Amino acid sequence: MTILEARTSAPQFDARPRQTAMAPEVWPLPRDVVVRRRRVQSRRPGGAPLGYRNTGVLMSRASHRRRPITPVATVLLALLAGGFTLWLGLVAQLGGPTEEPVQMPTRLSVVYVEAGETLQHIAARVAPDVPAGSVVERIRELNKLETSTVQAGQTLIAPIG
């Protein structure tokens, strides 16, 4: 190890403050000189709220006071909502498609249930032009079925068309 500088004592802490550009003072000052620092005057009274200016945040100039909703406004809003609900109900009831109901086939036939078939499959096979739900209901009526389960090899009476 090479010693570059021999020190005889520990370094002493310099208690003098560093000089800045704001306080061009000569240090140390004599004891009879009193340094008075100028206190920054506050621009607002003691209890006043802080006023922020030029913070970069845009603030609305609108009044932020909440105004109560008057009873007249409440009644008007309720009537508007009721009218809108009534209009939606009328559109749903009367505005649907006006298709002619498909006629259920009147001819009947005996149909054998194949393996893995359901009443929906049978209805689609025997009457492809008629909605399957109505054909299933007709098959259940004709065969006096309480459930829609069928077994392979079972014979059913079904409308064909």
Image: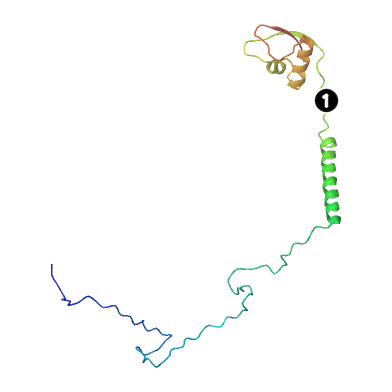
In the rendered image, residue 60, in percent from the top left (x then y), is placed at 68, 67
In the rendered image, the residue lying farthest to the front is 32
**Amino acid type of disc 1?**
Pro
The C terminus appears in which quarter of the rendering? top right
- The image position of residue 56, as x and y in percent, is 58, 70
Residue position marked by numbered label 1 in the rendering: 101
Residue 100, above or below 23? above
Residue positioned 85% across, 55% down in the render? 71
The reply, left or right, for residue 20 in relation to residue 116 is: left
Report the side of 106 relative to 126 (left or right).
Answer: right
Taking the image as shown, residue 7 lies to the left or right of residue 102, namely left
Can see residue 129? no
The residue shown at (79%, 59%) is 68
Colour scheme employed for the rendering of this structure: rainbow
Query: In the rendered image, which quarter is residue 92 located in?
Result: top right
Residue 74 lies, with reference to residue 146, above or below; the image says below
Q: Foreground residue, 102 or 140?
A: 140
